Amino acid sequence: MPSSSGWASGSPDTETTTATLLTRSQFTITDGDTIRLIGAAKGTRLVGFNAPESIEPRCEAEGDLGRKAKARLRELVATARLELKMIPCSCPPGTEGTGKCNYGRSCGSLFADGQDVGDVLVSEGLAVRFACGSTSCPPTPRPWCG
């Protein structure tokens, strides 16, 4: 993905983060790697992994797996203690929060009962690891369509 559309800067464990306790009623789930806080203009891209697209998949296999990843994320957050750690997106300086950075979305890690939901989705084959640099990301891994 081009540097102007970066997702996450480094590891959430090494970056300065802001942690917020959430309840399930405070956000909606867009797909397996994106949530939207109620009242927010744009979503929050969950970082460290890439889930298949459920809204505009490139092939039937991606769509099927994307719906499974979204459903599994719903299960993970349904009754868990939730924490969202916001982190800087991997974008050129001065572009975060604009359409030139991650489509205007923020970046963060979502934890359900202390476990990163991305780690769970990856371990269950519903997503793949995806790490970005400080100001840009490599091409987004999308192995589902062959």
Image (cartoon, rainbow, N blue to C red):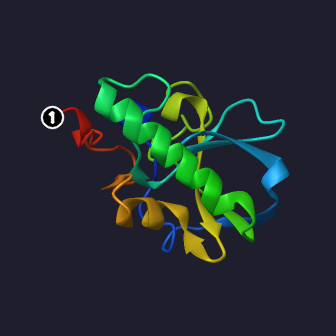
- Helix, strand, or loop for circle 1? loop
At 64% from the left and 68% from the top, the residue drawn is 112
20 or 53, nearer to the observer: 53
- Around disc 1, counting alpha carbons within 10 Å, would you say few (fewer than 14), some (14 to 19), or many (20 or more)? few
Q: Quadrant of the C terminus?
A: top left
Where 46 sits versus 19, above or below?
above
Which residue has dot 1 on it?
146
Q: Residue at x 57, y 38 (%)?
A: 96
Q: How many marks?
A: 1
Q: Position of residue 27 (x, y in %)?
A: 76, 45
Q: Position of residue 67 (x, y in %)?
A: 48, 38
Q: Amino acid at mark 1?
A: Gly
Report whether residue 44 is seen: yes
Can see residue 2?
Answer: no
Counting from the top left corner in percent of width and height, residue 62 is at 33, 34
Q: Residue at x 27, y 39 (%)?
A: 142
